[in-house]
């Protein structure tokens, strides 16, 4: 019965399952809440403010940004107190029992009804746009201003964990000593309690990672920092009376310290104290669906056999006829090198494989097109600095890749033969070439001779979303965030996204009129709306009815490969190219323009938002044509390119793109 329950929880609920021993608060809360109490204890000992403790114990040490006290607010201070009191009442034999106490200041907040985020006040309180934090000395709120010393920030950036922990322990700065203390006592507690609460080190680490959002579990951190080194330091601090408890480390800790591997996680499994050996992962059939499960330190990180690899992508397989393509760029953004890699993969798949799956070894699927080229300032040749302006014939050569419609709108200033404008023309020509290649790649995914499947987890934005929309099938995790968000940076989707929505509107037209559906798609694109889940992505039109949503992210590749295989086994044939797409034309454009005018006059959108909306409407409605006119995909793709370049040539769009690249936040101008 437990086996069936575990299989249900994994596949249908999307959960990671740990079989814990029946002890108070099980594993995650036992360790996580102890860590929180130890952090409170040492924060008080060092005299740190609550905001400084959070600054030290968040993303700097690979834990959630909510760190310690913000996490307590999110959980609920009353809930936290309940868990602590459970430990106090039921773990009387625990060597750390005296620390299982709700601090007076925390109980005072609870008694005052300040229970955390659910009532908008707890350890923190937002006043206007400012975040205030409880000051323990004055028992009142003050502006949150906890800052980590620059030297400690730099220390925490060390890529060598043994060296980082050596520096933390040896550094006399209070912030370094605080961090060493909370890690030392966490490691100590986990080692002593492991056998009584969990079957092995893997279960403890995964429980803490999944339950509290840590990047690595306690034993993983310890192993990475050097098992023997850390064990010796813990023993020294116990002997010196520095640790929170004087109970000795279990014998198995030093046995591993003296072993050749000095590891509790290996390729064969994780250490189990009861048998004093390694224990492999569960053999339940449900875990065969996790082709690459949540990996721990020490486990194999290899992914199949390489078909070909470039600096941007890797194409590989797992011994079957399904080829898999993974991006190597940061956040899996899409630049020229990735586009070339995708095109090469499609060609290879058509020649030698039954199907192609695009899947990333780690989320996100793709944060979209690489905007670096868009933000780069045009560079002049040093030899041209003192050269005369180019001749009209030279300028015409630079502009040869632009259609006359684009030249008239985008580059009319360049006709004055100013060198800066000519350099901008060069830049736009490069961008146009990239946009065209992007569109060609999207189309290649749609019309490949083998089925293409996008396996989507995490972000799939902009160009990443357009790739998803052009694959024959998409399989997405429930926690997928997908959307065409180009309008947020002052642009429009030009990798086939606008074209695809126009095509879907025509295919699903009610009584032969594509506009009712198109209007909904326009609002989604113009407002840069992003689906917050795989199911919502279906509602917004980014995913189709035939696309699948899976609950467990580690089952994603299994399901994607199954979809690809099903298409291939059914005798896959690519769809016919759409050559008669009915468009809404100038009537649709006029209707949307009236909506945009009302929104602009009402102060809901800016002048530039209005311009962006007009460009998107022009593309999605098929241009200035009679309603019901029939066009092909190339027509719509051409409109996309022109609209994209026209917007890119504006100063406000360039400012939006540059601001987003620098800050990660949108600019409204």
Image: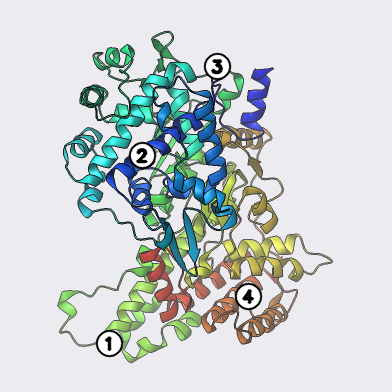
**Do residues under tags 1 and 4 come within 8 Å of each other at their CB atoms?**
no
Residue at the outermost right position: 511
The answer to which of marks 1 and 4 sits earlier in the sequence is 1
On the image, which quarter does residue 18 sit in? Answer: top right
Q: Residues within 10 Å of mark 1 (few under 14, many from 20)?
A: few
> Marks 1 and 3, Cα distance to the nearest angstrom?
74 Å
90 vs 151, nearest the viewer: 90
**Do residues under tags 2 and 3 come within 8 Å of each other at their CB atoms?**
no
> Marks 1 and 4, Cα distance to the nearest angstrom?
37 Å
Q: Residues within 10 Å of mark 2 (few under 14, many from 20)?
A: some
Q: Secondary structure at mark 3?
A: loop
On the image, which quarter does residue 2 sit in? Answer: top right
> Marks 2 and 4, Cα distance to the nearest angstrom?
59 Å
Q: Determine whether, in the image, residue 548 is placed left or right of residue 326.
A: right
> Marks 1 and 2, Cα distance to the nearest angstrom?
75 Å
Residue 77: image x %, image y %?
A: 53, 46
Q: Secondary structure at mark 1?
A: loop
The answer to which of marks 1 and 2 sits earlier in the sequence is 2
On the image, which quarter does residue 93 sit in? Answer: top left
427 vs 23, nearest the viewer: 23
The answer to which of marks 2 and 3 sits earlier in the sequence is 2
The answer to which of marks 1 and 3 sits earlier in the sequence is 3
Which residue has dot 1 on it? 391
Which residue has dot 2 on it? 41
Tell me the tag on residue 617.
Answer: 4
Which residue has dot 3 on it? 283
Numbered disc in front, either 1 or 4: 4
């Amino acid at each position: 019965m437990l086996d069936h329950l575990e299989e249900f929880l994994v596949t249908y609920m999307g959960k990671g399952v740990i079989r814990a021993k029946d002890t108070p608060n099980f594993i995650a809360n036992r360790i996580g809440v102890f860590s929180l109490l130890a952090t409170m204890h040492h924060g008080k000992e060092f005299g740190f403010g609550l905001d400084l403790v959070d600054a030290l114990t968040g993303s700097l040490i690979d834990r959630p940004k909510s760190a310690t006290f913000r996490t307590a607010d999110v959980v609920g201070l009353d809930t936290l107190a309940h868990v602590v009191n459970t430990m106090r009442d039921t773990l009387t034999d625990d060597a750390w029992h005296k620390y299982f106490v709700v601090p007076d200041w925390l109980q005072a907040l609870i008694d005052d009804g300040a229970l955390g985020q659910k009532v908008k006040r707890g350890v923190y309180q937002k006043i206007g746009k400012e975040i205030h934090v409880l000051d323990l000395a004055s028992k009142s709120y003050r502006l949150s201003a906890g800052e980590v010393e620059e030297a400690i920030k730099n220390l925490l950036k060390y890529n060598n964990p043994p060296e980082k922990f050596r520096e933390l322990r040896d550094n006399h700065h209070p912030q370094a000593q605080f961090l060493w203390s909370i890690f030392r006592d966490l490691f100590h507690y986990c080692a002593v309690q492991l056998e009584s609460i969990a079957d092995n080190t893997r279960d403890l680490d995964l429980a803490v990672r999944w339950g509290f959002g840590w990047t690595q579990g306690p034993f993983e951190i310890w192993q990475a920092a050097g098992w023997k080194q850390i064990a010796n330091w813990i023993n020294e601090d116990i002997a010196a009376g520095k640790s929170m408890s004087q109970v000795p480390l279990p014998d198995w800790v030093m046995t591993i310290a003296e072993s050749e591997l000095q590891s509790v996680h290996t390729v064969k499994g994780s250490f189990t104290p009861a048998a004093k050996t390694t224990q492999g992962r569960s053999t339940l059939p449900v875990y065969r669906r996790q082709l690459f499960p949540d990996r721990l330190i020490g486990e194999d990180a290899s992914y199949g056999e390489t078909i070909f690899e470039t600096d941007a992508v890797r194409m590989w397989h797992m011994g079957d006829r399904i080829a898999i393509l993974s991006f190597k760029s940061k956040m899996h953004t899409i630049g020229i090198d990735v586009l070339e890699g995708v095109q090469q993969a499609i060609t290879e798949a058509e020649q030698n494989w039954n199907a192609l799956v695009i899947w990333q070894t780690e989320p996100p699927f793709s944060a979209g097109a690489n905007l670096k080229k868009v933000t780069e300032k045009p560079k002049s040749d040093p030899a041209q600095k003192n050269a005369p302006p180019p001749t009209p014939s030279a300028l015409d050569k630079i502009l040869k890749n632009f259609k006359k419609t684009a030249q008239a709108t985008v580059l009319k200033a360049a006709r004055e033969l100013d060198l800066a404008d000519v350099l901008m023309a060069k830049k736009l020509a490069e961008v146009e070439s990239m946009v065209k290649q992007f569109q060609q790649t999207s189309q290649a995914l749609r019309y490949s001779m083998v089925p293409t499947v996008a396996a989507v987890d995490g972000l799939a934005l902009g160009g990443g979303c357009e790739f998803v929309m052009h694959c024959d099938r998409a399989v997405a995790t429930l926690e997928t965030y997908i959307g065409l968000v180009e309008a947020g940076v002052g642009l429009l989707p030009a990798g086939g996204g606008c074209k695809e929505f126009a095509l879907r509107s025509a295919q699903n037209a009610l009584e032969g009129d594509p506009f009712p559906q198109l209007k909904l798609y326009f609002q989604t694109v113009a407002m840069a709306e992003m689906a917050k889940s795989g199911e919502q992505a279906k509602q917004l039109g980014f995913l189709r009815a035939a696309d699948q949503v899976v609950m467990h992210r580690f089952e994603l590749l299994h399901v994607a490969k199954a979809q690809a295989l099903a298409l291939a086994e059914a005798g896959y044939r690519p769809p016919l190219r759409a050559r008669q797409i009915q468009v809404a034309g100038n009537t649709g454009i006029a209707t949307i323009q009236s909506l945009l005018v009302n929104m602009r006059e009402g102060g809901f959108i800016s002048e530039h938002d209005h311009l962006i909306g007009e460009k998107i409407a022009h593309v999605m409605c098929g241009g200035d044509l009679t309603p019901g006119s029939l066009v092909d995909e190339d027509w719509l793709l051409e409109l996309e390119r022109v609209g994209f370049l026209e917007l890119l040539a504006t100063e406000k769009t360039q400012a939006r793109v540059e601001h987003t690249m620098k800050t990660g936040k949108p600019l409204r101008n």
